[in-house]
Amino acid sequence: MTRIDDLIARLCPTGVEFKTLGEVGEFIRGNGIQKKDFTESGIGCIHYGQIHTHYGTWATETKTYVSPQLANRLRKARTGDLVIATTSEDDEAVGKAVAWLGSEAVAVSSDAYIFRHSLDPKYVAYFFQSDQFQLQKIRHVTGTKVRRIAGERLATIRIPAPPLEVQREIVRVLDLFTGLEAELEAELEARRRQYAHYRDTLLAFSHSKSVRWVTLGDLFQMRAGGHVPASSISNSCNDARPVPCYGGNGIRGYVAIASHNSAHLLVGRQGALCGNVQRTTGRFFATEHAVVLSPTPAVNIDWAFHMLTIMNLNQFATRSAQPGLAVGNLLRLRITLPPLDEQQRIASILDNFDALVNDLSIGLPAELAARRKQYEYYRDRLLTFEEAAA
């Protein structure tokens, strides 16, 4: 921090000039890449969806390629350009950007913009992650189910433009933070692979004489959840709506009346969430997007949670535009069932492993969450300047 303060005091003592993104660069819309166009080799390309799922703050290699013949017809990002995803299903992800730092130009799909500019590329990419950018951006996002932002609207967003030496020092500091975070992420990923190995080993009973084959219908009563109007769901828990409301992928909000009580499993039954398995306990409401599994005395619900998770129930969903998972199909699925005391032993071991790799209150997940908060704090602080008088 001291070196940056010194640089600011020396290079811009009366404040930092703010400019619009349109003043420091131009927005060029990508074009014409579909997933069917990907090839094993050729010219590198960035599809807008990959910005959401694959790329971080910057990249030097692409995940996918297109043929040279197709690439000749496409717009390309040069070294130092930003590639910006301009559509998403949620507001926060609209405008997610990656700085392209590879040596060769890469093709860019539609629903993405190339931002060709005069600033340090990593500096601009970090700015696109900041609260300062997000607060300005949200006013320009349009659309209902699919949220969008246009290049001409992005061009109006103001960015602090300190001297290049200051930009590069800020990048150096933030790179240190992201490097430390990447090390923790790699260690956590290694632990998760280890957990998955032990989980699969503990739940493999095909050669054990102490297990028997049963159907899920032998172990659970099942029925789909019920409908609740969106207007009846509160985003926060309060006296009027204290009951957690579960859909196919976790808590949707809170409602007034519970549909169930005590420990149950929930299985997502519609769309992309088919087969997703959740545990819940106490009073809750389950929507029609989930199948509620009520256990019999023969099964330990925590063991069953781990068992159903590794079974990948999504594979049993209907293959259609709107995948579905029927209760009748779930009831007929066969699994191996060890004795109850063995179920309890395995569940205890796996719950401990699961907490070590997924619980945000302990261990590596907690350390990684704290490091991310620290990074976000310093990122936003480093990108906040006193503006020079006009």
Image (cartoon, rainbow, N blue to C red):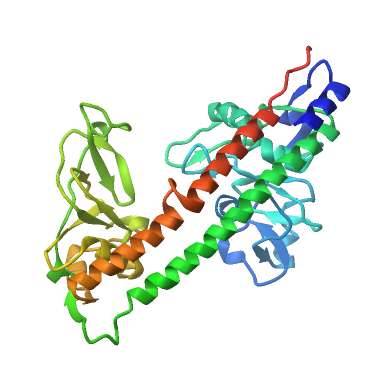
**Residue 280 x, y percent position in the rendering:** 25, 50
The front one of 386 and 38 is: 386
**Residue 270 x, y percent position in the rendering:** 29, 56
The residue at the point 65 percent across, 34 percent down is 378
The residue at the point 82 percent across, 25 percent down is 8
**Residue 93 x, y percent position in the rendering:** 53, 42
Question: In which quadrant is the C terminus drawn?
Answer: top right
Seen from this angle, which residue lies furthest top? 389
* Residue 182 in view: yes
Question: Eyeballing the image, is 154 above or below 58?
Answer: above
The front one of 248 and 44 is: 248
* Residue 317 in view: no
The front one of 266 and 94 is: 266
Question: Eyeballing the image, is 70 above or below 235?
Answer: below
The residue at the point 38 percent across, 73 percent down is 200
Quadrant in the rendering for residue 351: bottom left
Tally of marks: 0
Quadrant in the rendering for residue 11: top right
Quadrant in the rendering for residue 244: top left
The front one of 304 and 277 is: 304
Seen from this angle, which residue lies furthest right? 10
Q: Would residue 283 appear left or right of 311 to someone viewing this image?
A: left
The residue at the point 50 percent across, 37 percent down is 91
Question: In which quadrant is the N terminus drawn?
Answer: top right
**Residue 318 x, y percent position in the rendering:** 30, 66
